Amino acid sequence: MEVQTSEHGAASIVRLIGRMAERGDCEPLQRTVRELADSGKRSLVLNMENVEFLGPPGMGALIGALDTMTRCGGQLKLACVRGHAGTMLATTRMDRLFDICTDEQEALMQFAPAGATATGPAELSQWTSKTVIEFPSTEGNITEAARRFGSFLGQLRIDVGTKFNLQVAFHEAFANAVKHGNKADPSKCVVAECAANDRMLKICVTDEGEGFDTKTAIALKSNPFHDGGNGLDLIRNLMDEVSYNSKGNSISMVKFCSQALPEQHSGKDYSQVL
């Protein structure tokens, strides 16, 4: 695989050309990302337009690149993910782990200036980073909302594994709100308020539906003969705290995750995950 690097202000674009099928194919990418990180680069775009084939070693290399940038406090975005690469990331659900942009320009525009924070509602003013994601209740908007949430996570110094769990929990909560809360009614919206500080991240997803009896739902889930509520159970397993409002149309999720990076890597080799 060939790797071409160009600089765009404070950001670097790495264009990947060829196959990412074998471990040896991915060595140029791994070497380039390490060199950029060591040289102080903190905003990286991987352009995958010309990736002909993406295999498990290639997906492991992408995770490794994301981990390298995250550990040094940087951000990584994928751009122009198409063809076989796009199919593989979607099939393995790895597309939830990455912030994927349509093209290089969109990726470059999303990089937040140093010290910048997102804007959010007044009641979340005690948080250092925050954003509000709001969409009409259509299934197509579930993916877009998850992408926006991934972009927000990309600004935070959280380890890759925690980011993946947060992405899954967010997707489940937003999808439940669209499909079950608002009954996929495009005249109704789902609002996700996301906020983070140096020790935790909180997500509050609210729909305009009639709500549901959360106590009954939890009780039914404890019945081994009841088929349902798997999404809520998954969220509880992924998050540290989960609560609902009295109406049952809003879920609040908290994950305790320090943004202070450890001095040494945890030892987990993400290139071996796949």
Image (tube, grey):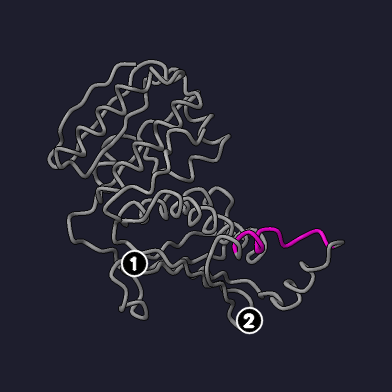
Image position of 213 with respect to 53: above or below: below
Residue at the spot x=83%, y=67% of the render? 223
- In percent of width and height, residue 118 lies at 29, 63
Q: In the rendering, at what x and y percent does residue 135 appear?
A: 48, 59
Q: Is residue 131 magenta?
A: no
Q: Height in image: 58 above or below 223?
A: above
Q: Which residue is outermost to the right? A: 225
Residue pointed to by mark 1:
130
* Position of residue 181 in the picture relative to residue 103 (left or right): right
Which segment did they paint magenta? 226-235
Residue 177 can be seen in this image: no
Instruction: Identify which amino acid the numbered label 2 is placed on.
Output: Lys
Front residue of 54/131: it is 54
Q: Distance between the residues labelled 2 and 1?
A: 25 Å
User: Which badge, 2 or 1, comes first in the chain's sequence?
Assistant: 1
Identify which residue, 41 or 64, lies in the foreground. Answer: 64
| Residue underneath mark 2 | 247
Q: In which quarter of the image is the N terminus?
A: top left
Q: Could you tell me what secondary structure mostly forms the magenta stretch? A: helix
Q: Residue at x 28, y 70 (%)?
A: 128
SS assignment at label 1: strand
Mark 1 is on which residue type? Lys
Query: Is label 2 in a helix, a strand or a loop?
Result: loop
Residue 199 coordinates in the image, percent (x, y): 35, 69
Tell me what residue is drawn at x 66 percent, y 75 percent: 210
Place residue 123 in its image quadrant.
bottom left
* One can see residue 231 in this view: yes
